Amino acid sequence: MFQIIALIAGTLFGLGLAVSGMSDTQKVIGFLDIFGHWDASLMFVMAVGIAATAPAFHFILRRSKPLIADKFYLPCNTAIDKKLLLGSALFGIGWGLYGYCPGPAIASLSYLNIDSAAFVASMLAGMFVANKAFPA
Amino acid sequence: MMTDFINASIGGLLIAFAAILMLAFLGRISGISGILWQAISNPDNSPISSNGWRWFFLAGLLIGPFLAHQVLGFSQPEPSDAGLIMAIVAGLLVGFGTKLGSGCTSGHGICGISRFSIRSLVATLCFIGSGVVTVFITQQLL
């Protein structure tokens, strides 16, 4: 049952990425190019996404537990530290250089493109390096 | 142009719906970088184990675009012309950064902000800010 829900949710998520334009590197770079030819449309992905998710999360989290799992698994770290700031800043540089954040990078594997596959392989390598360099 | 805004909004709704399903049923946050890391780094989460849901979610991420482009007729984006070297460099930064910063556009940007997490809001402002600066340098200065 976990697997079926996850497959449905992942498919909806991937559909959303493809329909929204988030898997289009040129569009993403256009969205970040606010001092040039700014393409504001992708702002609606996050704005509409949050507007729909926030109230739903509020009601879901009022329940004592999820529908089929034993408990809610929520991040409990609230620290705004150097790791958060440095990590997010480096992520943003990579995002701006190429136009992929992790979701669209994985989704783009379905386009059977060598460069996309190299991006994902390299992204995994980066995660392993970060995990070695800064153990949790 | 108007179509772009409508598609972006529909896409945002679909992503929200996915995040809502994951929290309501599995009690999980839909953070792609975290799901990917947990899937590949922990043998206990192999696809055939009871924790294997992460691999099914990731598989869905590939099925979704296939449906969008091959079945629903949304045009497939042009591949990036940035080149292989740039793909590797940017991929390293995205992987290293999201692991160190504990999240990406989905986990911090959509789910974290939706839980009113200040930490996620700061992370989101940080990666959008550095993305904007990066694009300013590559598109306007170079």
Image (spheres, rainbow, N blue to C red):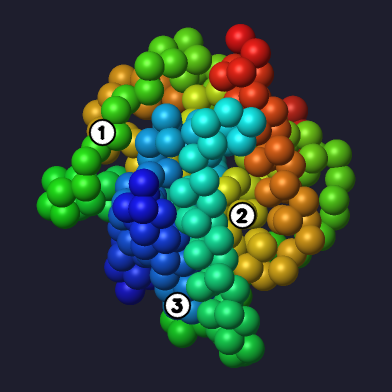
The amino acid marked with disc number 3 is Phe
Q: Chain of mark 1?
A: A
Q: Chain of mark 3?
A: B
The amino acid marked with disc number 2 is Gly
The nearer-to-camera label among 2 and 3 is 2
Q: Residues within 10 Å of mark 3 (few under 14, many from 20)?
A: many
Q: Residues within 10 Å of mark 1 (few under 14, many from 20)?
A: some
Q: Chain of mark 2?
A: B
* Residue pointed to by mark 3: B25
Q: What is the CA distance from the residue labelled 1 to the residue labelled 2?
A: 25 Å
* Residue pointed to by mark 1: A111
* Residue pointed to by mark 2: B109
A21 in relation to A89, above or below: below
Residue beneath the point at 70% across and 33% down:
B130
The image quadrant that residue B132 belongs to is: top right
Residue beneath the point at 20% across and 52% down:
B67
Q: Residue furthest bottom?
A: A63
Q: Are marks 1 and 2 on the same chain?
A: no
Residue beneath the point at 50% across and 15% down:
B86
Q: Are marks 1 and 3 on the same chain?
A: no
Q: Nearer the viewer, residue A99 or B137?
A: B137
Q: Position of residue A40 (x, y in %)?
A: 52, 46
For mark 2, give the secondary structure: helix
Residue B31 appears in the picture as rendered: no
Residue B75 appears in the picture as rendered: yes
Q: Residues within 10 Å of mark 2 (few under 14, many from 20)?
A: many
